[in-house]
């Protein structure tokens, strides 16, 4: 009898452990490349319909003030993985390598039993130019930052891409969106069948140039110029494949406990018509709202009710939010301090209206600091040129109110300068053990990298590489 009771207790214990694993949320981060804040159906775009993004927004939290960590791609990606402002991580602009001394959300989740996969654009290994596959021996490929499995390219990619399957160069057929969503779903199904929670990052190459869309996807944009037709066609393909992902999650009966977090990597493009940023000022590359503010949605049906919020949030908040949800142990040093983001968990089912911690930005000689409705714009850090705007009443950033609000202006200016000093310390490596900064790969074009030299004769036959290689010669 005692043996039977002991056996039952053992079975119950392991059953509970198994159920705990099943209950842990799956996490999927989806990011587009150069999709502006205004380019969604739910913001009533003049020509673009996004039925699947709209459905996601109606079922989760729609952020009307969600900010990319920087106004260009690589820096924002670094902020997603680390919770830190891009300059702290060594990713000062597009194409810089993420320091391998940084600690990523991927590494933390992997240590906590998650299967981890990256699909699509990486752009954190120091290479510039159109996306090419990464070598297995690359010191800065996704696998070296915590991803068990990765099908990735160094940068943007389009129809029928050549990608790296954990270091193996592989041809794929279809649009960038179709390829990476399909491959991600294979990974998801495999781990779902093993009852292993998963962390999946899907970083699309759309709608970055060179724009190439199918005839069907650009059919509704015949009145637009050629580039705009293809640009919007790529967004149609992305939205369709996002819908495919959501339907497959439901079919696998895991959608309820899967966190699906969508955003873009920076603001919209200037030469695409009609507008990519709605009424906002500026575009990709600037610290105006049009360069930083992006569409953002979190869907988690079992834990989040639908709401539309003007609460300011950023890609730097992704790591801290997930850390709280999964209950990461900070004593295990899963973060590199200081972290610039905050957890958004308190926002999920409450009516918090004010953000306690300001959102900072540093990009080249520019910067910004967001304190709820107030935004300090740093036109030039070197020249100490600062402006102040009230985003709530002046979303177009037309009226500098620094003179009318000297107390707010001076306080935010002082806070920004103090924060910038801490960033300078981070850049020097003082956040790492021993205050030591390791050597990192130089920012360079892959066409000039000796490792890619043997592949140039084949690569030049591909339309996405031809012009770049000829220009190099």
Image (tube, helix red, strand yellow):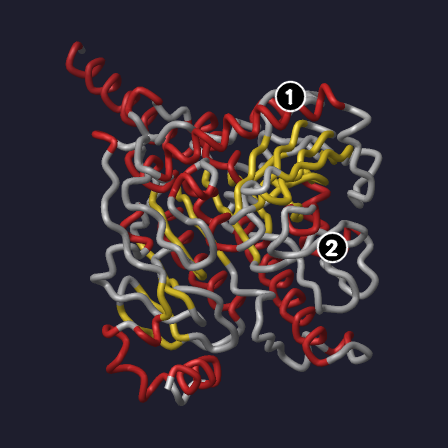
Question: 54 left or right of 67?
Answer: right
- Decide if residue 44 is in sight here: yes
Q: Which of marks 2 and 1 is nearer the N terminus?
A: 2
Q: Residue 60 placed where, x, y %? A: 66, 38
Secondary structure at numbered mark 1: helix
The picture quadrant where one finds residue 105 is: top left
Please report the residue visible at 42 percent of the width from the left and 87 percent of the height from the top.
Answer: 470
Q: Is residue 100 above or below residue 121?
A: above
Question: Which one is in front in this view, the residue at disc 2 or the one at disc 1?
Answer: 1
Q: Are marks 2 and 1 in contact (CB under 8 Å)?
A: no
Question: 80 left or right of 57?
Answer: left
Which mark is on residue 411?
1
Q: Looking at the image, which is closer to me, 243 or 47? A: 47
Question: 81 left or right of 389?
Answer: left
Q: How crowded is mark 1: few (under 14 residues within 10 Å), some or many (20 or more)?
A: few
Q: Quadrant of the C terminus?
A: bottom left
Q: Looking at the image, which is closer to me, 45 or 407? A: 407
Which mark is on residue 277?
2
Q: Residue 116 placed where, x, y %? A: 35, 47
Secondary structure at numbered mark 2: loop
Q: Is residue 76 above or below residue 120?
A: above
Q: Residue 418 placed where, x, y %? A: 50, 26
Please report the residue visible at 66 percent of the width from the left and 39 percent of the height from the top.
Answer: 377
Please report the residue visible at 37 percent of the width from the left and 52 percent of the height from the top.
Answer: 117
Q: Residues within 10 Å of mark 2 (few under 14, many from 20)?
A: many
Q: Is residue 213 above or below residue 189?
A: below
- Decide if residue 60 is in sight here: no
Please report the residue visible at 45 percent of the width from the left and 30 percent of the height from the top.
Answer: 421
C-alpha gap between disc 2 and disc 1: 30 Å
């Amino acid at each position: 009898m005692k043996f039977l009771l002991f056996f039952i207790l053992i079975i119950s214990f392991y059953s509970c452990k198994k159920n705990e694993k099943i209950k842990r949320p799956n996490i999927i981060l989806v990011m587009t490349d150069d999709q502006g804040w205004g380019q969604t159906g739910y913001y009533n775009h003049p020509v673009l319909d996004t039925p699947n993004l709209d459905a996601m927004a109606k079922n989760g939290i729609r952020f009307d003030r969600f900010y990319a960590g920087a106004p260009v791609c690589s820096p924002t990606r670094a902020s997603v993985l680390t919770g830190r402002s891009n300059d702290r991580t060594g990713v000062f602009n597009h194409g810089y390598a993420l320091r391998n001394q940084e600690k990523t959300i991927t590494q933390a989740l992997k240590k906590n039993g998650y299967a981890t996969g990256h699909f699509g654009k990486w752009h954190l290994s120091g290479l510039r130019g159109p996306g090419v596959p990464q070598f297995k021996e690359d010191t800065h490929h996704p696998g070296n930052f915590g991803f068990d499995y990765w099908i990735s390219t160094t940068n943007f990619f389009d129809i029928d891409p050549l990608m790296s399957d954990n270091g193996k160069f592989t041809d794929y057929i279809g649009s960038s969106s179709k390829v990476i969503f399909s491959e991600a779903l294979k990974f998801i199904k495999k781990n779902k069948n093993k009852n292993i929670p998963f962390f999946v990052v899907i970083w699309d190459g759309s709608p970055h140039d060179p724009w190439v869309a199918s005839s069907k996807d650009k059919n509704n944009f015949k009145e637009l110029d050629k580039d705009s037709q293809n640009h919007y066609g790529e967004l149609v393909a992305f939205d369709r494949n996002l819908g495919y992902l959501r339907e497959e999650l439901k079919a696998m009966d895991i959608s309820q406990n899967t966190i699906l977090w969508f955003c873009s990597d920076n603001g919209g493009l200037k030469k695409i018509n009609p507008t990519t940023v709605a009424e906002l000022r500026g575009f990709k590359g600037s610290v105006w709202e049009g360069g930083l503010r992006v569409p953002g949605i979190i869907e988690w049906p079992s834990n989040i009710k639908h709401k539309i919020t003007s609460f300011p949030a950023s890609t730097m908040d992704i790591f801290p939010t997930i850390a709280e949800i999964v209950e990461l142990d900070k004593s295990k040093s899963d973060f590199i301090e200081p972290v610039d983001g905050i957890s958004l968990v308190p926002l999920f089912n409450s009516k918090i209206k004010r953000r306690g911690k300001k959102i900072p930005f540093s990009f080249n000689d520019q910067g910004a600091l967001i304190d709820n409705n107030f935004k300090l714009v740093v036109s030039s850090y070197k020249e100490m040129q600062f402006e102040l705007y009230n985003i709530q009443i002046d979303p177009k950033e037309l009226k500098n109110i620094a003179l009318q609000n000297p107390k707010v202006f001076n306080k935010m200016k002082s806070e920004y300068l103090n924060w910038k000093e801490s960033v300078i310390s981070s850049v020097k490596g003082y956040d790492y053990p021993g205050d030591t900064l390791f050597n990192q790969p130089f920012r360079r074009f892959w066409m000039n990298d000796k490792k890619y030299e043997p592949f140039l004769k084949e690569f030049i036959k591909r339309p996405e590489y031809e012009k770049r290689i000829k220009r190099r010669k």
